Image: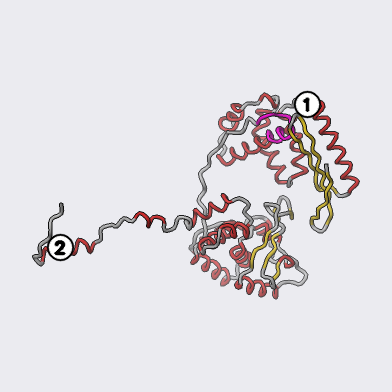
Amino acid sequence: MAIKTYNYQNKTFYEVHVKLVIHGKQVNRKKRAITSIAAARREELKLKIELLKLREGQRSYTWNEWVNICLERIKVEFRPSTLIGYQSQLNNWVNPVLGCKQLADITSNDIHSLVFNQSGNLANNSRRNILKHIKRIFAMAIEDGVLAKNPAVGIKIKIPESKKLVFNKTEIQTVLEEAKKRNHRFYNHWVMALMTGMRTGELFALQWSDIDLDSAFISVNKSWTPKNGFGPTKSSENRVVPISKELEYFLRHLKTKADSNTASVLERHSDWRSGIQAKILRKFCDEIGITPIRFHDLRATFITQLLLQGVPVAKVMAIVGHSQLKTTMVYLRLVGTDVKGVTEELNIRLPREEDFANVVNLFRTGEHVPKSY
């Protein structure tokens, strides 16, 4: 049991963590974003009582009852958009089917039927999201000692890897030159995305105080979404992006034109706030005759260009904030640097046109050509 403090946006908050062994399994309860030590102590007591009650008399839950408990925890521990996602998927597809069933009576067959047979004409991506939410609800029951096993484990939905579109070197130069020439309102945004690999929300939240031109580093420590507003990065971890000489020149020039009262590096105009930056970039690419990519694909372009230049995968992961190797491997497969030159080991020589031409010339000159045996 512990109460810890942490800082967020220059404010001090408290986090309470309580744990207790129930039926041989350690069960945890946690609550964050508490504004005072007194409130934190009250929450600590509440969580202790909750766990003690759970240990003294384990009760059974229907699916709906357990989902409501889980949603209350998700509301406290995650972003509002995460809660909305759970509520939408569960209310539309899962609760009408499993709602009145006892949690302990739900089988793998029940879940398989729901996901594959009772979810209408949903795309596989949507089915996978539903399954992910179901698995998490059951996982929370196991964490709390309510269930011994997760009936959704083992059920999988295979989705073909989508084709990623990126700019090649020529297209990078083309889009930047054309955007600069036309004074496009997203020119600065595209430069920053291509030169840093930062996500659109991270660029939106970027402030001049995050940029150290003398040390040549950008501190990526926050993000923004239309649903959640400002908050931590996608991984909730901070990272630094090195500033190249070309980017340093761009930033120094941009800063000279910036309003001294504006903290943000890039203009947060309405098209960006409304989330249509992907549509705008695709339209511009079509106009100038290059690969029509989305705004997020500028990040993919940054990653593939680093890999093509031979930058070690570990360094690329650190710069772009990938916590798992498999995420970066998608881009490695895209550029093929991990297998480049391997087929040379086949050592197969194909017949050349000149080989046959030499044979014909020998016949014409009357020279003896030995037979092949």
- Percent coordinates x, y for residue 164 in the rendering: 52, 53
Examine the rendered structure and indicate whether residue 203 appears above or below residue 71: below
Examine the rendered structure and indicate whether residue 147 appears above or below residue 89: above
Q: Give the label on residue 58, or none.
A: 1
Examine the rendered structure and indicate whether residue 363 appears above or below residue 331: below
Which residue is drawn at the image coordinates 70% and 57% (left, top)? 238
Q: Give the label on residue 360, or none.
A: 2
Residue positioned most to the left: 366
Hey, which quadrant is residue 113 in on the image? Answer: top right
The amino acid sitting under disc 1 is Gln
Element at label 2: helix
- Percent coordinates x, y for residue 369 in the rendering: 12, 60
Crowd tier of the residue under label 1, counting other residues whose Cα lies within 10 Å: few below 14, some 14–19, many 20 or above: few
Q: Judge whether residue 284 can be spotted in this image.
A: no
Cα–Cα span, label 1 and label 2: 92 Å
Which residue is drawn at the image coordinates 76% and 72% (left, top)? 260
Give left or right: position of 76 versus 176. right
Q: Which residues are magenta?
A: 137-149
Assess whether residue 280 is covered by the magenta stretch.
Answer: no
Q: Which numbered disc, 1 or 2, marks the residue that appears first in the sequence?
A: 1
Assess whether residue 141 is covered by the magenta stretch.
Answer: yes
